[in-house]
Amino acid sequence: MAENVKTTKLAAINSMLRMIGESSVTDLANPLRADVTAAIELLDEVSREVQSEGWWFNREVVDLTPEQSGVDTGKILIPSTILSVDKILYSPSKECVERGGALYNTKDNTSIFTDKVEAIVTYQFEFHTLPEVARRAITTRATRFLCEARVLDIALSK
């Protein structure tokens, strides 16, 4: 049987823990140790930071469509999986930013749209869905930050 060659979140956390001299864990569901919780939070934070830069694996040109009914009719709501809307394509009359979870046209001072908007968006994906090269880069960066925090921990010197 083939060995799993992809870095799982558990493998990433255990790698981080080994680098600071702590024992591995078998499960991340209910971390009982503070170092495990810190490693999980740091890995998630670094993952968000790295993905926010926008890479070939998490940037796409998409059509953002206004809501058709309800309280938000005409608004283009930005899903929580989208980290940023970087550029509005083919529309010099629109310069949009995200405000309050929706797209806002700063040229017209409105958050109401009548047509779809084509934009480049940056998504945030779960760790296990990332390409292996991104998983390794995130794990390496998070490990470095964890090691630096551990070395600078004043409580360890007492």
Image (tube, rainbow, N blue to C red):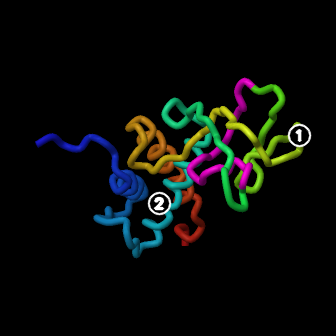
Given the image, on which type of amino acid does mark 1 rest? Asp
- Nearest the viewer among 140 and 134 is 134
- Nearest the viewer among 125 and 138 is 125
Question: Which residue is most to the front?
Answer: 69
The magenta stretch spans residue 84 = yes
Q: Are marks 2 and 1 in contact (CB under 8 Å)?
A: no
Q: Secondary structure at mark 2?
A: helix
Query: What crowding class fits label 1: few (fewer than 14 Cα within 10 Å), some (14-19), or many (20 or more)?
Result: few
Chief SS of the magenta region: loop
Q: Residue at x 69, y 35 (%)?
A: 117
- Nearest the viewer among 73 and 7 is 73
Given the image, on which type of amino acid does mark 2 rest? Ala
Rendered image: mark on residue 39: 2
Residue 149: image x %, image y %?
A: 56, 58
Eye-nearest disc, 2 or 1: 1
Q: Residue at x 83, y 29 (%)?
A: 93
Sooner in the amino-acid sequence: mark 2 or mark 1: 2
Residue located beneath label 1 in the image: 108
Q: Residue at x 39, y 56 (%)?
A: 13
Left/right placement of residue 148 relative to residue 24 reads right
Query: What crowding class fits label 2: few (fewer than 14 Cα within 10 Å), some (14-19), or many (20 or more)?
Result: many
Rendered image: mark on residue 133: none
Q: Mark 2 and mark 1: span between their CA atoms? A: 45 Å
Q: Does residue 129 lie above or below 35 as drawn?
A: above
- In the picture, the quarter occupied by the C terminus is bottom right
- In the picture, the quarter occupied by the N terminus is top left
Residue 141: image x %, image y %?
A: 51, 44
Q: Which residues are magenta?
A: 73-90
Residue 124: image x %, image y %?
A: 54, 46
The magenta stretch spans residue 104 = no
Q: Does residue 90 lie above or below 52 as drawn?
A: above
